[in-house]
Every structure is written in C-alpha cells, then in structure tokens.
Amino acid sequence: MDRIQVGHIPSITWNRLKTNAAVIEKAPVLDVSVDTTFQKLPEGVSVKTMSPDDAAKWMKAHAPEEEPEKVVASKQPIYHPQAFATGLGEEYDTYMRGSLREVHLLEVKDGVQIETPVLWDQTFYSGNQAASAQIIHVGEGASLTLAMTCRSSRKAHGTAAVSTKVLLEKGAKLTLAKVQLLGKGYTHFDDLGAALLDKASMQFISLELGAGNSYTGAQAELVGNASAFQAKVGYIAQDGTTDMNYNVVQRGRKTNCEMSFDGVLDHGAVKRLSDTIDFRRGSKGSYGHEKENVLLLADNIVNKSLPVILCEEEDMEGSHGATIGQLDQDMLFYLASRGIDEKAAQQLMVRARLGAVARELPEEKLREEVRDYIEEAFQA
C-alpha cells in the first residue's frame, strides 16, 4: 500500500515540528475481517451486515448533506474534503474502502430507550492485518449505551484498522465507549465520524492502552441546534507512537463541546495530540472547551500538543488549557517519608490519571479488566 497521511488538522499551519498530520510510510494490505461478537441485543436494536457499496449508499441517503469545504475560518487550504468527515481523514477513509469486505449497521428505532449497555467485542489474532467498519444509527428520541472493545493476546502482532460512523437523529442520545487492549506488537487505527442533529447528544469515552503504535481520530459535526458532544480520552504511550486528532465542528446554535485528554508517556514514547474546536458561522450562543493533562515518566520521550480554536462567529465561548509535567519532587519526598518509593508513587499517579477515565465506562466487568490492564502495564 502507498504512503498515507492520517489525522490531518483541519486548517494548515506551519509544519516545522511536524504537527499537521501523521504519516504512514507503508500502510499494510488489510486482508481479513474481524471476529465480532455481541451480547444479546435488546428489543428495538438491530444489527445487520452489508457490502461497502451498500453502506456508502446508506450513508448518502441518511446522513446530513455536507459539501466538501475549501475554507475554514477564512484560512486556506483545508485538508478535510470529505462529505462525511472523520478524524483520521480522507486518505484513511479511502484506504479502508479499498479493504473492507463488510460493514455492520447497528440501528436503534425511534423512541427506544436502551438502559442496559450493549457490549460489542472485536477479537484480533496474531499475524492478521484486519479491518472492521460500523455505522451506528440512533433514531429520533432514542438512546443507546454501547461499549466496543478491541482485544488480542498480549504477545500478538498485526494491524487492527477500525472505522466507525455515527448518525444521531433529533433528540437522540448515545454513550459510546471504545477500549483498546491489543498486544504491543499491534498497530491500531481507529477512526470516528459523527453527525448530530437538533438536541442530539453524544458522550465518547476512549481508552488506548495497548498496541505499540496507535493512530486515532474523531470528528463530530454538531449540525443541529442545541446538540452536544463530550469526549473523555485516556491513553498510555510506551516505546512507540501515539497519534490523536480530534475535531469538533459547531454549526448549530447553542451547541456544546467538552473534550478532556489524560495520558501517561513512558520510555521511548512519541505522542502527538491535535484537538480543534471550530465555531462556524451560525453557531451563535455555542460553548467549547478542551483540556489536556499529560504525565511524563521518562526523559526520552517526545510530546507534541496542538490545541486549536477556529472561529467565524462572535457570540460564542471557547477555551483550552494543558498541564504537562513530571512527578513533583516535593510530593515524591513526602511519599518517600511514608515508605512509598518512586516506582510505587508513579503507579499511584497512573492509576489516578487513567482511573478517572476508566470510571466512565458503562460496565463493571470492563472497568475491572481495564484496571487490571493498567496495573500490569506499569509493573516493574
């Protein structure tokens, strides 16, 4: 496969530090589908498979119309020329379309309120170059909580490429949790695109804990008035690349966006986070906030953060902030005086940092599995 760019920021900036995008020099050929299992689906929820061509036709018929744009906040050029935008972008979308054998369509009927979390497990096997794609459609006034988990054995290696597209009708509510627990020999791609109509809301929880190299992205289009998107992201980066691109485009009036990122960087980690809040003309009365907290556990790491706010509207409120640093020496001295060495102190801080995100997961067994995974990741 040819060289592809993933996670390109919406509006081009000076690229001396190479923060505009991540580059995959040789993307592998994806040759197998993923082993997918569900618990029993509640009444009012259906899942079916379709061909990639049929999935594209479904999206064209049901998703809000979006003309590919050339200008963002009066700046040219724009990289995302997709009709249905996603976080990893057009080149990844094309890459996946050429590889998929099937797409799962999960739908919730209008007005159906699903109280029990739906668990969707995807198992990846060592040596596979696997692709998985989903469309999630929540009907008008309906609600769904969905937990998707990518797993493999701890020593497995391969490629796991995932694409998820979400459509929330008027008044729909979705809590979507994605948990990645792949072996360190894996390269993981995870792409999300979402369109929210009037008064729709989405809570997105993401935990990237395994995989030696991870490339993830999300783009939420707040098309409808009073729509809302919240993202809580946690990640561990060790001896590899962790690359994230999150964009929220606020188009409707009185829309709301909140994004928080909590990460731990250990020996040999290279991490890039670009997170953009984009207030488009017509988004009067909207609010957007983003924050990042990064804990550095070593000196031989690379950390790149690019928070961006783009604005074409006057009556709005946007803010961002970041806290990046190592363990405080005074705190380490205090803990040492109580018999807690530096390694144990690190583990305490890691638990606190990632545990706050893990507690948001909608199912207790999954929360326990994540806590155990985090503990093992930082054992001596």
Image (spheres, rainbow, N blue to C red):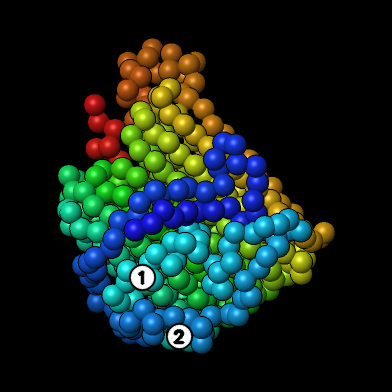
Quadrant of the rendered image containing residue 48? bottom left
Judged left or right of residue 84, residue 131 is left
- Taking the spot 24% from the left edge, 26% from the top edge, the residue there is 380
Quadrant of the rendered image containing residue 372? top left
| For residue 338, above or below residue 59 | above
Quadrant of the rendered image containing residue 98? bottom left
Instruction: Find residue 158 and report its horizontal and vertical position in percent.
Output: 23, 52
Quarter holding the N terminus?
bottom left
| Res 277 visible | no
Q: Which residue is most to the front?
A: 2
N-term mark: 1 or 2: 2
Mark 1–mark 2 Cα distance, whole angstroms, equals: 16 Å
- Check disc 1 and give the amino acid type: Gly
264 or 353, which is in the foreground? 264
- Check disc 2 and give the amino acid type: Lys
Instruction: Find residue 228 and report its horizontal and vertical position in percent.
Output: 60, 65
Label 1: which secondary element: loop
Instruction: Find residue 50 and report its horizontal and vertical position in percent.
Output: 32, 83
Residue that carries the numbered disc 2 in the rendered image:
57
202 or 271, which is in the foreground? 271
> Which mark, by number, is residue 98?
1
Label 2: which secondary element: helix
